[in-house]
Image (cartoon, rainbow, N blue to C red):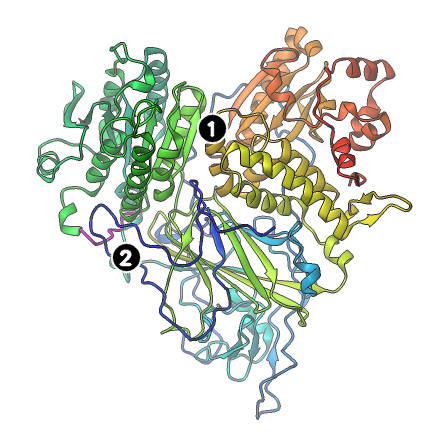
């Protein structure tokens, strides 16, 4: 369904007519000039982005980059040492590897068929009859060329309908999920030379191009322009051309590094040049402070010894801790009610204090500082305490820039990777710049909130310009006014995460936030065949106006600027047919450019070719239900900023399901009912999960929680997004194994334990009968806990891991995430939950009697209420 242009408070922003630029607090020159006026119509109308030399004529082996200089082969963002996760519970029955059935969470690889055919309408003429354009798809892989399960691009279907009217059904839609920072196979070759690009549109040479062997000319698959290769692609046969990775693989990385870049820093020094500054709320009560101190002490022990760290506390004042004192916790104090003056910053930065220090030299000092923290003493409610968070972040930025900050004004410095400012907040920003009044009843609250939003966004943009990412980790019972803090994290490329307390989950996220690798200076360019129109993009980025017309005459690529490039992110790209398609294939090229943590410039190019079909059945058979469900969910959540809009979106999902059945299903004879297409059976159930999930359902009550969850989802990777839409259910078996089952409440069997992975939460449920046996329940709980930690080992934010017994008050959190299939007739239960067949009649009766009555419909009841016959389980 067509979404109107809108700007989200989360990471999703709108591409549309040019908007007035928001100026930085300090004069900064724009790095990206506005697009020039051109008479050439663009291939893409402005879509909605919501918020993310070789010259020898003979064939030579391409210059491939070795892992030297800090470039890890096959990985865009090298993984550093993994921070320790939660404590591991050793199970006496835990096997060497936890076996469970293959998860449906990973979509099938895209099948890429044979080389593109030369356009029959206007083939180029060559005087030499022996000169022919050669396909570059290897012969053995002409029919299927999977990108692979680790591909950064996942399409909702592996075929494209030719007819515009059939293809552009908004209820189903077509598109792709692009994960710029996704780790790929180690076998991916890295090329250390300039790529060959189309002189007309800027597209990259790729596996699907046709090559004129005699001259080395190649035809662009996007605009069909013929380009030269400076003799590099001259070859006696097409087999010789397979030595070039870009002509033998649909995904390649071009890397530039070394002394040819003035800003290059050796590997051994590059990570040290990106500090971590902790900005800590000092207005905490004693129970929260004790948990925070434990998490901070564990954090100090987890980070690498070469990492540089800074510590700042904020309340009514800003305290910047000095690491030059070995025996006492010493700090310099600045006023918090206004921004520090230039003189006060000079006095701080040019003084004798050491505010950033490598961990190996200051670990004990950091421990002493954290041990010296004291609870808040005044008798003032948490929400009414003065917190100058904005001033503290400004001071942190000044420390990152260092004493030479005034010499580099207007120049974007380039340290090794993004610096990180991690804010540990227990309440709202209520004092100084960017603050809001303590009470919502303040007569000028709305105006002050509006000014605070703008100021926080400007501060986040300033941080981004100086390669600093701001993560805000909140905890406790005091509302932090998420709408005010969110723009600060968003504009810098960071995240805002809510926690129940400063305990285990907070500590894990603190460690993962500090060590996760992130690329900077990121851009995503999308080019498609002329028949395809990009209509909407949802993700962590904004439109980038880049003038390339001096280099490429008709470059109509859609370019998106990314504040940071991380594995946890993805973009949802929606597309339509411009017209009826006549060719047998359409092409898509995604170019991802960024600088990694070692300052290597990466250009990852992914080229995908999809066949076009007339048959609707063939199109539906190629549909990827899980990818499509995530695309639909992101488009839907974009329009659900507040709870009342979320309720409207549930109704929209109902209408979407009915329209899909009407357009692609069949009518039941002698009835007004329609059958949902059997090819999309999994999609209907995923949409039902979405309708009931915390994203749209009634599970979450507070607006802060709903806002944070929504913003996280709009930018999350495919894997995390899918889990947030539809939970994954794993039943514990005796012996330490797990069986994956549908996420139905029929899994709640009294003698079993169940793990439910819902993305931001992982639940462990113990049946009453199992819990009564102390030995068995301990073994089951340990195995389930270990599995929960393994499932979320690299996830950021780290999920809460909650365990409870059947019948407890907390068990309601688990029950509400499952489809209430116990309300269905027995034959439907067995069809959709085959594990029931292993139960005896007595066990079936016992299971049925354990459920309480409530109004929520089952999946089948919901479908029938829409006048749609539920599809048979796949």
Q: Is residue 412 magenta?
A: yes
- Can residue 56 be seen? yes
Determine the residue positioned at 90% across, 47% down.
669
Determine the residue positioned at 27% across, 9% down.
379
Distance from disc 2 to disc 1, alpha carbons, whole Å, reads 35 Å
Q: Nearer the viewer, mark 2 or mark 1?
A: 1
Mark 2 or mark 1, which has the lower sequence index? 2
Q: In this image, 176 relative to 731: left or right?
A: left
Mark 2: few/some/many CA within 10 Å (<14, 14-19, 20+): few
Per the rendering, the mark at residue 392 is none
Judge by depth and name the residue closer to the eye, 319 or 505.
319
Identify the magenta region.
409-416
Percent from the top left, x then y, of residue 384? 30, 19
Q: In this image, 779 relative to 338: left or right?
A: right
Mark 1: few/some/many CA within 10 Å (<14, 14-19, 20+): some
What is the total number of numbered labels drawn onto the structure image?
2
Percent from the top left, x then y, of residue 366? 25, 24
Q: Residue 506 sits in which quadrant?
A: top left
Per the rendering, the mark at residue 703 is 1
Position of residue 779 relative to residue 604, above or below, is above
Quadrant holding the C terminus = top right
Q: Is residue 223 magenta?
A: no
Q: In this image, 297 relative to 317: left or right?
A: right
* Residue pointed to by mark 2: 30
Q: Residue furthest right?
A: 670
Q: Pointers 2 and 1 in contact (CB under 8 A)?
A: no
Percent from the top left, x then y, of residue 347? 8, 35
Percent from the top left, x then y, of residue 820? 72, 25
Judge by depth and name the residue closer to the eye, 319 or 504.
319
């Amino acid at each position: 369904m067509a979404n109107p242009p809108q700007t989200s408070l989360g990471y999703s922003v709108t591409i549309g007519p040019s908007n007035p630029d928001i100026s930085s607090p300090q004069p900064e020159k724009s790095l990206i000039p506005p697009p020039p006026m051109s008479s050439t119509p663009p291939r893409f109308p402005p879509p909605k982005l919501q918020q993310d030399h070789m010259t020898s004529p003979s064939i030579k082996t391409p210059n491939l980059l070795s892992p030297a200089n800090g470039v890890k082969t096959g990985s865009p963002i090298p993984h550093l040492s993994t921070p320790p996760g939660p404590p591991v519970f050793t199970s006496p029955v835990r096997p060497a590897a936890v076996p469970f059935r293959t998860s449906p969470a990973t979509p099938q690889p895209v099948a890429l068929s044979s080389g593109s055919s030369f356009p029959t309408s206007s083939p180029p003429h060559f005087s030499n009859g022996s000169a022919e354009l050669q396909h570059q798809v290897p012969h053995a892989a002409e029919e299927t060329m999977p990108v692979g399960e680790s591909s950064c691009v996942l399409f909702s279907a592996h075929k494209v309908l030719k007819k515009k009217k059939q293809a552009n059904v908004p209820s189903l839609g077509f598109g792709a999920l692009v994960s710029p920072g996704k780790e790929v196979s180690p076998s991916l070759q890295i090329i250390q030379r300039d790529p060959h690009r189309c002189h007309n549109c800027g597209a990259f040479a790729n596996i699907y191009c046709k090559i004129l062997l005699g001259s080395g000319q190649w035809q662009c698959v996007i605009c069909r322009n013929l380009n030269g290769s400076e003799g590099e692609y001259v070859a006696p046969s097409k087999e010789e051309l397979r030595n070039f990775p870009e002509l033998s693989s649909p995904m390649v990385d071009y890397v530039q590094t070394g002394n040819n870049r003035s800003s290059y820093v050796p590997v051994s020094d590059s990570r040290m040049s990106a500090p971590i500054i902790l900005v800590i709320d000092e207005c905490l009560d004693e129970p929260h402070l004790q948990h925070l101190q434990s998490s901070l002490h564990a954090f100090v022990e987890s980070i690498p010894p070469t990492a540089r760290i800074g510590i700042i506390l904020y309340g009514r004042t800003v305290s910047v801790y000095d690491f030059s004192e070995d025996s006492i916790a010493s700090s310099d104090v600045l006023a918090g009610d206004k921004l520090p003056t230039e003189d006060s910053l000079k006095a701080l930065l040019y003084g004798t204090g050491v505010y950033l220090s490598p961990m190996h030299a200051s670990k004990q000092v950091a421990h002493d500082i954290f041990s010296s923290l004291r609870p808040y003493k005044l008798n003032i409610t948490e929400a009414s305490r003065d917190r100058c968070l904005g001033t503290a972040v400004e001071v942190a930025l000044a420390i990152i820039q260092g004493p030479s900050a005034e010499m580099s004004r207007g120049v974007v410095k380039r340290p090794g990777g993004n610096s990180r400012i991690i804010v540990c907040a227990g309440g709202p920003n209520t004092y100084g710049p960017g603050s809001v009044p303590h009470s919502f009843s303040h007569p000028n609250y709305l105006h002050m909130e509006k000014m605070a939003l703008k100021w926080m966004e400007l501060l986040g943009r300033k941080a981004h310009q100086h390669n600093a990412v701001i993560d805000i980790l909140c905890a406790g019972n005091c509302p932090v006014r998420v709408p005010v803090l969110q723009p600060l994290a968003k504009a810098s490329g960071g995240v805002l995460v809510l926690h129940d307390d400063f305990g285990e989950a907070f500590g894990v996220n603190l460690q993962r936030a500090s060590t996760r690798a992130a690329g900077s200076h990121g851009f995503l360019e999308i080019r498609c065949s002329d028949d395809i129109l990009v209509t909407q993009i949802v993700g962590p980025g904004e439109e980038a106006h880049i003038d390339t017309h001096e280099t490429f005459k008709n470059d109509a690529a859609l370019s998106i600027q990314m504040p940071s490039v991380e594995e946890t992110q993805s973009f949802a790209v929606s597309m339509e047919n411009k017209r009826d398609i006549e060719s047998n294939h359409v092409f898509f090229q995604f170019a991802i450019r960024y600088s990694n943590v070692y300052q290597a410039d990466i250009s990852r190019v992914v080229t995908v070719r999809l066949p076009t079909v007339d048959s609707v059945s063939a199109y539906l058979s190629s549909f990827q239900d899980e990818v499509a469900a995530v695309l639909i969910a992101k488009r839907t959540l974009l329009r659900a900023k507040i709870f009342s809009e979320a309720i409207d979106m549930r109704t929209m999902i109902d209408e979407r399901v009915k329209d899909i059945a009407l357009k692609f299903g069949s009518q039941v004879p002698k009835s007004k009912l329609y059958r949902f297409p059997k090819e999309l059976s999994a999609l209907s159930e995923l949409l039902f999960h979405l309708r009931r999930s915390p994203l749209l359902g009634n599970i979450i009550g507070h607006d802060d929680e709903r806002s944070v969850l929504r913003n996280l989802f709009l930018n999350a990777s495919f894997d995390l997004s899918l889990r947030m839409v539809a939970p994954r259910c794993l039943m514990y078996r005796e012996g330490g194994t797990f069986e994956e089952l549908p996420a139905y409440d029929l899994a709640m069997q009294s003698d079993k334990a169940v793990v439910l992975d819902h993305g931001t939460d992982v639940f462990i449920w113990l049946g009453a009968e199992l819990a009564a046996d102390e030995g068995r329940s301990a073994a089951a709980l340990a195995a389930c806990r270990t599995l929960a930690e393994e499932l979320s080992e690299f996830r950021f934010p780290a999920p809460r891991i909650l365990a409870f017994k059947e019948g407890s008050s907390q068990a309601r959190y688990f029950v509400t995430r499952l489809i209430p299939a116990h309300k269905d007739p027995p034959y439907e239960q067995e069809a959709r939950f085959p594990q029931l067949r292993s139960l005896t009649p007595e066990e079936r009766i016992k299971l049925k009697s354990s459920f309480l009555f409530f109004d929520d419909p089952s999946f089948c009841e919901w479908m029938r209420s829409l006048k749609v016959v539920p599809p048979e389980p796949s």
